Image: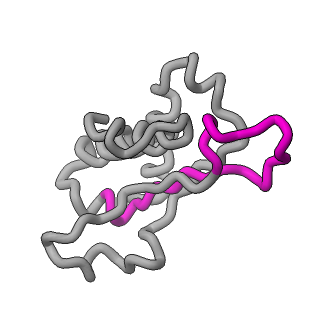
Amino acid sequence: MTRERFRKLVAEALDSLPQRFRERIHNVAVVVEDYPAEQGPPESFAEDQDLLMGIFDGVMETERSFFQPEAGPARVVLYQRNIEAVCDTDDEVREEVRLTVLHEFGHYFGMEEDQLEDV
């Protein structure tokens, strides 16, 4: 899938977030990368290893303080090649992008991994 098409899927996923959540998102950059540099490309992974689909990098909304200046934008990163590696069809890629966006913005809003298991 082209990067442009993948970014459109990310935009669709962001647009599908409920309005009450979209209104609360401030200073967050959404970035698409191939894969995490520290993990390497998905084809180098053993079948039983988990690929990272995305990550939230920043201060969670629940931990922000009015008295602390922001150090810069938070980031939600989606790893395109990892997502594609676990999907067989474009529809599966769309769904995995949607789930990853929901999951990482869940972290932005202060949810922990165990709270996000069903996302």
Q: Is residue 90 magenta?
A: no
Q: Position of residue 54 (x, y in %)?
A: 43, 55
Q: Is residue 94 visible?
A: no
Way the structure is coloured = one colour
Q: Count the marks: how many?
A: 0
Residue 67 sits in quarter: top right
Relative vertical location of residue 53 with respect to residue 119 in this rendering, above or below: below
Q: Is residue 11 left or right of residue 66?
A: left
- Residue found farthest to the top: 20
Residue at 72% in and 50% down: 73
As displayed, is residue 1 above or below residue 95?
below
Q: In percent of the image, x 85 and y 47: which residue is there? A: 69
Q: In the image, is residue 46 above or below residue 59?
A: below
In the rendered structure, which segment of residues is drawn in magenta? 59-83
Q: Quadrant of residue 79?
A: bottom left
Task: Say which residue appears at 56% left-offset and 24% top-offset.
Answer: 21
